[in-house]
């Protein structure tokens, strides 16, 4: 990772946009975690449906990783961080 050698200046609009994207990421991750918790609870209540619910559980970590990667890319771009 290569960090900028000079101070980075962001406009208020850029800060607002990064904050909006961070908020969206937090919201998305909370939704994915809620889906996971709901699937676990449904498995507890109806074990016979476990196979169907496990698919929901299995999908969520990739979605969380994708949301984090997308925000990280925008954050790094805004701050001039190179990989």
Image (tube, rainbow, N blue to C red):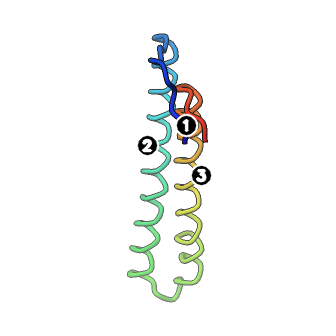
- Position of the N terminus by quadrant: top right
* Residue drawn 60% across the image and 36% down it: 82
* Residue drawn 48% across the image and 19% down it: 6
Front tag of 1 and 2: 1
Residue 33 rendering spot, x and y as whole percentages:
43, 59
- CA–CA distance in space, label 3 to label 2: 12 Å
- CA–CA distance in space, label 3 to label 1: 22 Å
* Residue drawn 51% across the image and 89% down it: 48
Determine the secondary structure under disc 1.
loop
Relative to the observer, which residue lies in front, 73 or 40?
73
Residue 40 rendering spot, x and y as whole percentages:
42, 74
**For residue 7, above or below residue 68:** above
Residue 64 rendering spot, x and y as whole percentages:
52, 55
- Residue at the spot of label 2: 26
- Residue at the spot of label 3: 66
Determine the secondary structure under disc 2.
helix
């Amino acid at each position: 990772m290569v960090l900028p050698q000079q101070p980075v200046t962001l406009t208020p609009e850029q800060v607002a946009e990064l904050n909006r994207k961070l908020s969206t990421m937090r919201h998305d991750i909370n939704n994915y975690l809620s889906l996971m918790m709901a699937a676990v609870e449904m498995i507890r209540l109806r074990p016979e449906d476990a196979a169907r619910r496990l698919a929901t559980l299995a999908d969520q970590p990739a979605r969380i990783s994708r949301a984090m990667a997308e925000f990280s890319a925008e954050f790094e771009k805004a701050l001039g961080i190179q990989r």
